[in-house]
Image (cartoon, rainbow, N blue to C red):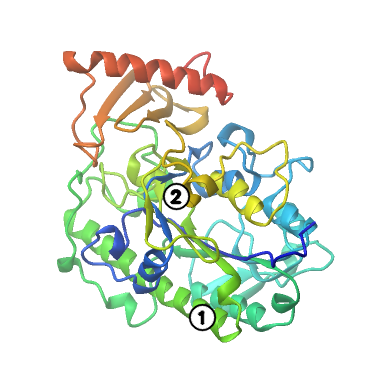
Amino acid sequence: MLSCMTPAPNFLFLIADDHRHDCLAHRGDPVVQTPHLDRLAAGGASFTHAYNMGSTTAAVCIASRAMLHTGRSLFRAPAEPAPETPLLGELLWRGGYTTFGTGKWHNRAASYARSFSQGARIFLGAMPDDQYRVPTYDFQPSRSYDPHDQQLEEGRFSTELFTEATQEFLRGPCAQQRPFFAYVALTSPHDPRCAPPPWGTHYTADQVSLPPNFVPEHPFPIGVREVRDEALVPYPRDSAEIRQHIADYYGMISHQDEAIGQIIATLEETGLRENTLIVYTADHGLGLGQHGLMGKQNVYEHSLRVPLILNGPGIPTAFRSDALLYLYDLFPTLLERARLPLPASNEGYSLNALLSGLTDTHRSTIFAAYHDQYLQQADGRYFQRALRGARYKLIEFHAGPRHHRLLFDLQEDPFEQHNLAGQFSYQQVLLTLSDELRSARQQLDDPLLVEG
């Protein structure tokens, strides 16, 4: 239980869907406007190399959120965690917190019920087909979420629904009586990208530049051509259409930023801001034309890296770290801040040593995977594995009858455009990363290691 000596911090956990790591003004994007997130970063800590480990299915958000809420690595964090695997909200609830959840869950109703003592406008699906027609549940004290109990909220944008639910919770008595964990899971900037006025038309295609690694199609098949995300734009990708998608994406991000500002204002108005640690992150990134890809079903940087900002009590100001970390490292970080013991199941590494200045390093490598089963297609089997270190990154595409090995110098080539795998001078780097990748696959129980 929590100590009575000093107040335990509140946690406001804001998680976006599809927000790529570099689409923030303070991260150098010259077009998108994100003043509230920029202020959070300036007054807190920003981590530039936070990674999702990948996914075992095309629904990347399921795997990412399962890892986050269990503190477990990819192949050990199923979509519906076993009852003996404790969840972040569940542990905080047991430890004396009021736990409130609104927005997208996507890890099945039973896990939501284990995690939250309160909630509102709960969306248990993958994504709304229409951001203005969102099927949600009211909180069920019985912990039973029958599909017949869903209500269709029409005419209001999803971000506005979840923001209002959060504000109502913060203004209520439960947010004042005990420390709280408020988990706010937005369905933005995921498509359909149709932000309300003025943001829906604020950015135009002619304002937007194509990314340096834009190509009309990926140079070789990687088994994702028919995935829903990739079908948003026909092949070959048209540059004008990609620019419009990016402009609409920016509109969603700026509208979301505005909503986050409203939530922070509510924290201030209720007197809760001083003792509330705010976390902002996303479940994964997005291609939007990079490498000819639209979605996140790949292991390139644009799909794996996410924003991560912490701001609040005990967090240094104007702190920036380039340390390599996984999104699920937040699991032990928050539990330690709540002064609660870590479960034996935890695999995350707390960020608190970084935040306190005790170290400036965290992880030496990052592993990533796409799919734990073979995507069996007419010409063979498809899956992806990757490992990056401080400078170099190796990607192995098992693509039907072919095996592609890509080696990138991320210091000189952050957009992963120049494959060094065939150059003699990089053979030792390639060999070292290949050995480390195989070792990581063994340690992480990769089910395809024997044949891959």
Q: Look at 34% across and 39% down and name the residue there.
A: 300
Of tags 2 and 1, which is closer to the observer? 2
Task: Assess whether mark 1 and mark 2 are in contact (beta carbons under 8 angstroms).
Answer: no
x and y percent of residue 80 in the render? Answer: 69, 44
> Residue 386, located in which quarter of the rendered image?
top left
x and y percent of residue 259 in the render? Answer: 46, 76
In the displayed structure, does residue 328 sit left or right of residue 143?
A: left
x and y percent of residue 316 in the render? Answer: 45, 60
Categorize mark 2 by other alpha carbons within 10 Å: few (<14), some (14-19), many (20+).
many
Q: Is residue 128 visible?
A: no
Task: Measure the C-alpha gap from mark 2 to mark 1.
Answer: 25 Å
Q: Look at 56% across and 49% down and name the residue there.
A: 330
Q: Residue flagged by tag 2: what amino acid is it?
A: His
- Quadrant in which the N terminus appears: bottom right
In the displayed structure, does residue 104 sit left or right of residue 422?
A: right
Q: Residue furthest bottom?
A: 269
> Residue 200, located in which quarter of the rendered image?
bottom left
- Residue 174, above or below 186: below
- Residue 427, above or below 219: above
- Name the N-terminal-most of marks 2 and 1: 1
State the mark number for residue 156: 1
Q: Nearer the viewer, residue 213 or 306?
A: 306
Tag 1 secondary structure:
loop
Q: Residue flagged by tag 1: what amino acid is it?
A: Arg
Q: Residue furthest right?
A: 142
Residue beneath label 2, please? Answer: 284
Q: Nearer the viewer, residue 82 or 357?
A: 357
Tag 2 secondary structure:
loop
